[in-house]
Image (cartoon, rainbow, N blue to C red):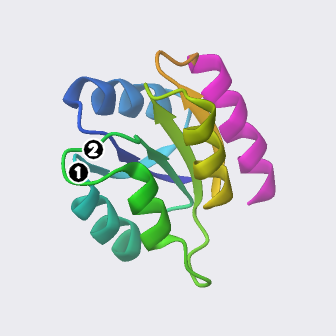
């Protein structure tokens, strides 16, 4: 499964990359802002995107709304420090499959990816 990591924190991107590659997932790109995320998502066509909601140039929700088109099939897992119910509902209504609140549980993320893996 091919994964795109989107987070403005170098530490989070690096941690996610290590976690994902150690569990057999292919990280095909990393983005530190929304514009880069949109470009990479449309260019690389990942299977899964881990998407932070707080980015320096736009929200993850804005990214989600932009890439969520009929021909875009990536599954999006929001991973954010923003845990308000309204943010979670907005993300899911706009195409996010899951919403994990930081600090998230690595086992939970891998479990979600394993479930998605069965769909591919």
Task: Judge whether residue 68 can be spotted in this image.
Answer: yes
Judge left or right: residue 33 versus residue 1.
Answer: left
Q: Mark 2 points at which residue?
A: 55
**SS of the residue under disc 2:** loop
The residue nearer to you, when weighing 2 against 86, is: 86
**SS of the residue under disc 1:** loop
The residue nearer to you, when weighing 94 against 18, is: 94
Image x and y of residue 13, in percent: 31, 33
On screen, residue 53 above or below 23: below
Judge left or right: residue 22 versus residue 9.
Answer: right
Q: Residue 61 carries which label?
A: none
Judge left or right: residue 34 versus residue 96.
Answer: left
Q: Quadrant of the C terminus?
A: bottom right
Q: Which of marks 2 and 1 is nearer the N terminus?
A: 1
Q: In which quarter of the image is residue 41?
A: bottom left
Residue under the point 35% across and 50% down: 59
Residue under the point 61% across and 71% down: 73
**Mark 2 Cα shell of 10 Å, populated few (<14), some (14-19), many (≥20):** many
The residue nearer to you, when weighing 96 against 1, is: 96
Q: Quadrant of residue 75?
A: bottom right
- Whether residue 107 appears in magenta in the rendering, the answer is yes
Magenta stretch, residue numbers? 106-120
**Residue furthest to the bottom:** 71
Q: Quadrant of residue 89?
A: top right
- Whether residue 108 appears in magenta in the rendering, the answer is yes
Q: Mark 1 points at which residue?
A: 33
Report, in whole angstroms, how far the alpha carbon at label 2 lies from the one at label 1: 5 Å
Residue under the point 54% across and 26% down: 83
Task: Judge whether residue 45 can be spotted in this image.
Answer: no
Q: Is the magenta stretch mostly helix, strand or loop?
A: helix
Contact, mark 2 vs mark 1 (Cβ under 8 Å): yes
Image x and y of residue 98, in percent: 66, 42
């Amino acid at each position: 499964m091919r994964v795109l990591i989107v987070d403005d924190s170098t530490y989070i991107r690096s941690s996610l990359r290590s976690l994902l590659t150690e569990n057999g997932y292919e990280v095909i790109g990393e983005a530190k802002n929304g514009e880069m995320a949109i470009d990479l998502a449309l260019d690389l066509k990942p299977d899964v995107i881990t998407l932070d909601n707080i980015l320096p140039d736009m929200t993850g929700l804005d990214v989600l709304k932009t890439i969520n088109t009929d021909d875009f099939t990536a599954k999006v897992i929001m991973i954010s420090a923003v845990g308000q119910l309204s943010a979670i509902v907005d993300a899911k209504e706009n195409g996010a499959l899951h919403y994990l609140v930081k600090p998230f549980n690595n086992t939970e993320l891998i479990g979600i990816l394993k479930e998605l893996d069965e769909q591919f």
